Image (tube, rainbow, N blue to C red):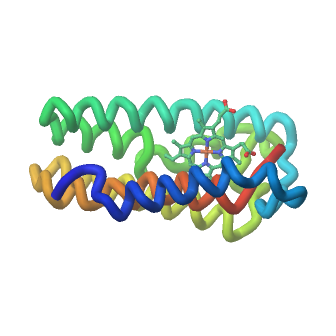
Amino acid sequence: MPFPDKKTFRKALATLAFFVVMPAYSEDPRQFVRLTPQAQETLRQEMLDNLMALVEILSLIAEDKFREAGILAEERLGRGAMGKNARLPFDARPGPQMPAEMHRIGIEGHFAASEFARAAIAGDKQGALAKLPAVLGQCVACHAAFRTR
Ligand code: HEC
């Protein structure tokens, strides 16, 4: 399978075009979610780590190191990355402050990353590549539907 496949690439382009064109409309269609400033900061740090993790995962894939990519994906994006904020004071935890649908997309993202990880660690390269668009798909789904600022 070519990577990224054409369909996924076209979807990404369409999403990008949507955001570029958006300023022409006065209404931002994304739902505004009010998080405490502390929760916003927790989320922002997580997001920056998400992006770095993705780059590291893609670099490992490019080097044909699927097992390492899988381990990293599980720890940083997958189920292994869930529940880290439970120790924080409530005000600093973004999860419980999110609307149910937003929270669900976040959890689906963790599950998608774990599915990629499982295939990658098992050495199923084609299977792992096929699971990767769903990981990015959850990033896009949430960003396209919700905003916090
Ligand atoms: C459940 C929702 C959700 C998911 C899933 C999600 N994000 Fe975010 N992300 C946000 C919100 C909310 C912001 C804050 C910006 C805003 O309000 O529009 C943000 C901001 C960011 C930022 C900007 C950080 C900064 O310094 O301001 C990056 C980068 C980012 N996300 C990357 C990712 C990546 C990569 C993924 C997937 C692995 C991802 N996000 C998945 C909700 C999400």
What residue is rendered at 70% in x and 35% in y?
42
Q: Is residue 37 above or below residue 145?
A: above
Q: Residue 133 placed where, x, y %?
A: 36, 57
Position of 46 with respect to 40 (left or right) is left
Position of 123 with respect to 139 (left or right) is left
What residue is rendered at 64% in x and 53% in y?
143
- Determine the image quadrant of residue 59: top left
Q: Is residue 130 above or below residue 61?
A: below
**Which quadrant is home to the N terminus?**
bottom left
- Determine the image quadrant of residue 114: bottom left
In the foreground, 89 or 117: 117
Q: Is residue 108 above or below residue 24?
A: below
Q: Residue 47 placed where, x, y %?
A: 59, 37
What residue is rendered at 24% in x and 50% in y?
3
Q: Is residue 92 above or below residue 135?
A: above
Q: In terms of image quarters, where does ligand 1 lie?
A: top right
What residue is rendered at 19% in x and 49% in y?
120
Position of 101 with respect to 139 (left or right) is right
In the foreground, 23 or 49: 23
**Which quadrant is home to the C terminus?**
top right
Farthest residue to the left: give it: 123
- Determine the image quadrant of residue 70: top left
Q: Residue 29 placed where, x, y %?
A: 79, 63
Q: Residue 24 placed where, x, y %?
A: 81, 53
Position of 39 with respect to 117 (left or right) is right
